[in-house]
Amino acid sequence: MVDIGPTLPRRQLGRYLRELRQAAGFTIAELARRIERGATTVQRLETGTADRIRLWDIEAICRVCGADATTTEALKGLAQQGNNKNWWHQYGDLIPLNFDVYMGLEAGAVRLTSFQELVPGLLQTPDYARTLTRLAHPSESDGEIARRVEMRIRRQVMLTKKADPVPIEVILDESALHRMIGSRRIMEAQLRHLADVSARSNITIRILPFKAGVPMGDLTGPFTILDFPRSADGEPIEPPVVYAEGYTGAMYFDDPELVERYRSAHVGLREVALGVQDSRRLLREQAREFAR
């Protein structure tokens, strides 16, 4: 039995459990009956409001819904995470390396605000994504690499769907326009893609030029602020979260003061970044350079 408070891991666990149930075609009542638990227990697990999480409940849900071994271990790992407001997720620690924890968080967001030093996944072309994925997972099979890339590309529909596409505001370090990923052809296509999608009303891309120096007086590292839906009274259903990825793991912050510091940092970076039109122009210019 795991006793955890209102933490990020618990809320993410709830998202995955809900998706599993819906994919299996069960109502909450049907699933509860199959695992011999009350409907209230299942509902609280899915909404992240359970006072206690029993690992055998997670195993039972995964078994009944047909989850694979990786997903089952990942969800058990989420259930075992500590009761920390800010959560450090070390890759391969409790949760399998090939399970994307961040994906569930991203899928529930209604707005993304980001500073990146590489093209973010939601804006990557398949070739760019495939190159990075292969470099990050050199021992994986071609089939697993293809699966990862397909998942990443499929996630992009949240930005391109006709009804209520998710707004994303990205500040991209100029180094991303010059750092070779794969080949000149891949880079040309990727930069042209960024220029094209930046014309969409919900996608804002600004380039932080080299000449801006270090505007915050220190390096922030890449980060993404995720905002979630609001209830009828205007309050967030979930608190905003900052996701900061590193080489060996990722940090998730939902402490209001830390989230606000990252928002302030993004504002500071935006003030010295190029405007939208100048950024688009620079993207096209650099794409032409790679085409030569």
Image (tube, rainbow, N blue to C red):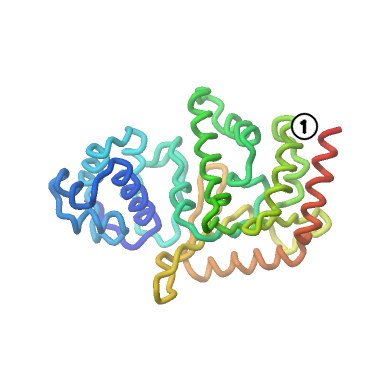
**What residue do we see at 48% from left, 27% from top?**
144
4 sits left or right of 112 in the view: left
Left or right: 94 in relation to 143: left
Q: Position of residue 248 (x, y in %)?
A: 53, 42
How many residues crowd mark 1 within 10 Å: few (<14), some (14–19), many (20+)? some
Secondary structure at badge 1 equals helix
Picture residue at 48% right of the left edge, 57% below the top:
109
Q: Residue furthest bottom?
A: 233
**Residue occupying image coordinates x 85% and y 38%:** 289
**Residue 3 locus on image (x, y percent):** 26, 57
Between 148 and 194, which is closer to the camera in this rendering?
194
Instruction: State which quadrant residue 129 falls in.
Output: top right
The amino acid at mark 1 is: Arg
The image shows residue 21 at horizontal and vertical percentages of 29, 45
Residue 128 in view in this figure: yes
Q: Quadrant of the C terminus?
A: top right
Judge whether residue 216 can be spotted in this image. no
Q: Which residue is mark 1?
A: 184
Closer to us: 192 or 91? 192
Residue 208 image-quadrant placement? bottom right
Residue at 65% across / 35% down in the picture? 128
